[in-house]
Image: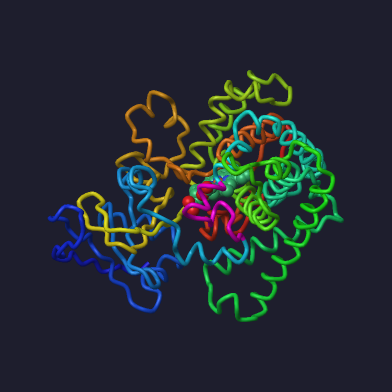
C-alpha cells in the first residue's frame, strides 16, 4: 500500500449543539474518484491495520462521502449503542443490497426495522433455536460420512467450501425444512451463484445493476430464480396452514402485538432471502478459519480434543454439553477475533456528533470494523497471535466489552448470534472428535474481505481419522 498522506486540520467552526471546542480528526489524503475506497479495495485488511497509526478516529473521502474510520471501543460503543438513534444505514453500501434483500432486517431501517425486529426476535430466542441442534449435528454427521473415503484415500478437500455446503444445508433445514443437498433442489446452487456475484458487485458496483452487463444479468437472473422458489414455498405453506417448527412457520405466524397483523409475502420473501445470505456464509467462514488456525497450532488442537473427549466421551454433542465445552467456545471466539466474517460495516450520522473529542458532521459515513478494533494492540497484546486463553474470565476481566464485537452490538446486533455460536460449537465438537485436518503443504492462504472475510483461495486440507 502506498503511504497515505495525513493532514491535521485546524479546528473547524461548529454549527450544532455538540460542544464548541471540538477538533477535526487527521485526514487521509487520497486521489481519484473513489477516494480512500480504492486503497481499501486493494488490500482492505492492511488498510485497516495500518491506518490506525494516524489515530483512533481517521477521516477520509470514501467514494461520495466524507468518512470516519473508528478504532476505539468507546467510539464503537457510542455509535452502536449509546447514541445509536443518531446513526442509520442510509449508505450506498447497503443500498447496493436492496434489489436483492429488499426490506429484510439487514438492509431495513427506521420504524419499519423496529417493527420487523420485534416480530422476528422471538424466532431467534435461545429456547426456540435449541430445537435446531439435532438438525445441526445430523447434517455434520452426514458430512463426515462423505469425508470417510477422502480420509481413507488421503485426498484433499476444500474445507472452506465444505463448511459452506454444510451451513447452507443447515439453514435450508432450519428455515424451510428443505434438504438443499438434494440435487433436484435449485435453491442451493442459486444462493451460491448469488453470493459469488453479489460479492463481486458490492466491491465493483460499476456499471450499476440497471445496466444489463453479463454479470448484472446473471445476478438478476439468480435473484429471480431464487425469489420464484421462495414465493412458491411461501404459497404452499400458507395453503397447508400448519406449524412445522421451522423459521418460516414462525415468520408466517408472527403477529404485531398492537394490530394483530402478520407479514405479507413480499416481507417474508425479503426476510428469508436475508437469512439465506446472512445466515450461512458467515458461520461457514468462521469455521473455515478455525480449522485453518487449529492446523497451525498443534497444542491448541490437542487441548481442544482433550476437552471434547472428556466432555463427550465419544457421543454426539447435544445442547446440554455446550456449557461444558468451554475451551471449544474460546477457540471459536479467538478465531472470530482474528478473522471476523463481518469484518467491516458502516453507518451514517444523522445529526452532528462527537467522537473522542472530534467533530463528526451530519451525513458523514462512519466505518466500523470488528477486524480493526479486534487487532487494536492496546486491547489485544500481540494481536496477530492465536491465543484462545485471551477469553478466560480472568483475562477478559476489565477489557472493554466493545473491544470485541464480531456480531456487532447494540440494538442492531446480529439476530443470529446465538444460532451461529451454537451451530459452530456443535459442528466443531462433532468433527474434531473424529478427525484432524491438515493444510496441504504450499496451498496459499490469504484472507479476502469481500462481503465477508474469507480465505481467498479456499482451504485445501486433508482429513485424518483419529
Ligand atoms: C459467525 C456467524 C455470523 C457473524 C460473524 C455475523 C455477523 C453479523 C454482523 C457483524 C451484523 C451487523 C451488520 C451490520 O450492521 O451491517 C449482522 C447482522 C445480521 N445477521 Fe449475522 N452473523 C453471523 C451469523 C448469522 C446467522 C446464522 C444469521 C441468521 C440465521 C444472521 C442474520 C443476521 C441478520 C438478519 C442481521 C441484521 C440484523 C438487524 O440489523 O436487525 N447472522 N451479523
Residue in view at x 41 percent, y 57 percent: 347
Residue in view at x 13 percent, y 56 percent: 20
Residue 258 in view in this figure:
yes
Give the farthest residue toward the right: 184
Q: On the image, which quarter does residue 40 sit in?
A: bottom left
From the image, which quarter does the N terminus lie in?
Answer: bottom left
Tag count: 0
Judged left or right of residue 397, residue 451 is: right
Instruction: List x then y, in percent, for residue 406.
Output: 48, 44
Judged left or right of residue 31, residue 12 is: left
Instruction: List x then y, in percent, for residue 289.
Output: 57, 45
Instruction: List x then y, in percent, for residue 278.
Output: 60, 51
Residue in view at x 51 percent, y 65 percent: 95
Magenta region: which residues?
A: 101-116
Instruction: List x then y, in percent, for residue 26.
Output: 23, 61
Judged left or right of residue 36, residue 118 is: right
Q: Nearer the viewer, residue 432 or 220?
A: 220
Q: How is the image coloured?
A: rainbow
Note whether 11 is above or below 148 in the view shown.
below
Amino acid at each position: 500500500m502506498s503511504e497515505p498522506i495525513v493532514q491535521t486540520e485546524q479546528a473547524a467552526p461548529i454549527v450544532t449543539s455538540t460542544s464548541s471546542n471540538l477538533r477535526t480528526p487527521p485526514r487521509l489524503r487520497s486521489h481519484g474518484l473513489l477516494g480512500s475506497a480504492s486503497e481499501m479495495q486493494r488490500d482492505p485488511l492492511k488498510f485497516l491495520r495500518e491506518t490506525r497509526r494516524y489515530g483512533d478516529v481517521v477521516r477520509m473521502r470514501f467514494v461520495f462521502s466524507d468518512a470516519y474510520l473508528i478504532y476505539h471501543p468507546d467510539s464503537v460503543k457510542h455509535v452502536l449503542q449509546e447514541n445509536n438513534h443518531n446513526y442509520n444505514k442510509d449508505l450506498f453500501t447497503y443500498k447496493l443490497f436492496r434489489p436483492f434483500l429488499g426490506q429484510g432486517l439487514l438492509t431495513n431501517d427506521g420504524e419499519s426495522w423496529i417493527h420487523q425486529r420485534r416480530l422476528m426476535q422471538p424466532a431467534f430466542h435461545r429456547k426456540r433455536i435449541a430445537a435446531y441442534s439435532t438438525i445441526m449435528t445430523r447434517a455434520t454427521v452426514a458430512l463426515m460420512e462423505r469425508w470417510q473415503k477422502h480420509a481413507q484415500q488421503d485426498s484433499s478437500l476444500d474445507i472452506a467450501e465444505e463448511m459452506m455446503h454444510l451451513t447452507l444445508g443447515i439453514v435450508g433445514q432450519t428455515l424451510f425444512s428443505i434438504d438443499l443437498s438434494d440435487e433436484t433442489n435449485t435453491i442451493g446452487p442459486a444462493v451460491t451463484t448469488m453470493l459469488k456475484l453479489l460479492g463481486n458487485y458490492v466491491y465493483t458496483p460499476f456499471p450499476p445493476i440497471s445496466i444489463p452487463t453479463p454479470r448484472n444479468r446473471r445476478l438478476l437472473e439468480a435473484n429471480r430464480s431464487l425469489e420464484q422458489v421462495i414465493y412458491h414455498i411461501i404459497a404452499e405453506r400458507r395453503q397447508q396452514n400448519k406449524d412445522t417448527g421451522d423459521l418460516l412457520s414462525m415468520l408466517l405466524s408472527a403477529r404485531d402485538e398492537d394490530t394483530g397483523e402478520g407479514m405479507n409475502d413480499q416481507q417474508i420473501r425479503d426476510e428469508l432471502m436475508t437469512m439465506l445470505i446472512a445466515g450461512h456464509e458467515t458461520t461457514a467462514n468462521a469455521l473455515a478459519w478455525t480449522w485453518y488456525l487449529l492446523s497451525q497450532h498443534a497444542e491448541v488442537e490437542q487441548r481442544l480434543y482433550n476437552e471434547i473427549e472428556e466432555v463427550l466421551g465419544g457421543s454426539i454433542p447435544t445442547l446440554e454439553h455446550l456449557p461444558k465445552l468451554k475451551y471449544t467456545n474460546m477457540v471459536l471466539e479467538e478465531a472470530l477475533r482474528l478473522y471476523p466474517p463481518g469484518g467491516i460495516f458502516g453507518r451514517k450520522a444523522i445529526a452532528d456528533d462527537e467522537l473522542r473529542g472530534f467533530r463528526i458532521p451530519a451525513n458523514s459515513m462512519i466505518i466500523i470494523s470488528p477486524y480493526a478494533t479486534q487487532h487494536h494492540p492496546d486491547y489485544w497484546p500481540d494481536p496477530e497471535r492465536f491465543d484462545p486463553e485471551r477469553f478466560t474470565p480472568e483475562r477478559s476481566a476489565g477489557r472493554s466489552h466493545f473491544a470485541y464485537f464480531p456480531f456487532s452490538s447494540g440494538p442492531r446486533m446480529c439476530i443470529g448470534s446465538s444460532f451461529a455460536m451454537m451451530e459452530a460449537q456443535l459442528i466443531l465438537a462433532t468433527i474434531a472428535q473424529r478427525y484432524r485436518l491438515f493444510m496441504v503443504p504450499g496451498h496459499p492462504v490469504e484472507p479476502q474481505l469481500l462481503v465477508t472475510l474469507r480465505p481467498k483461495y479456499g482451504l485445501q486440507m486433508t482429513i485424518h481419522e483419529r
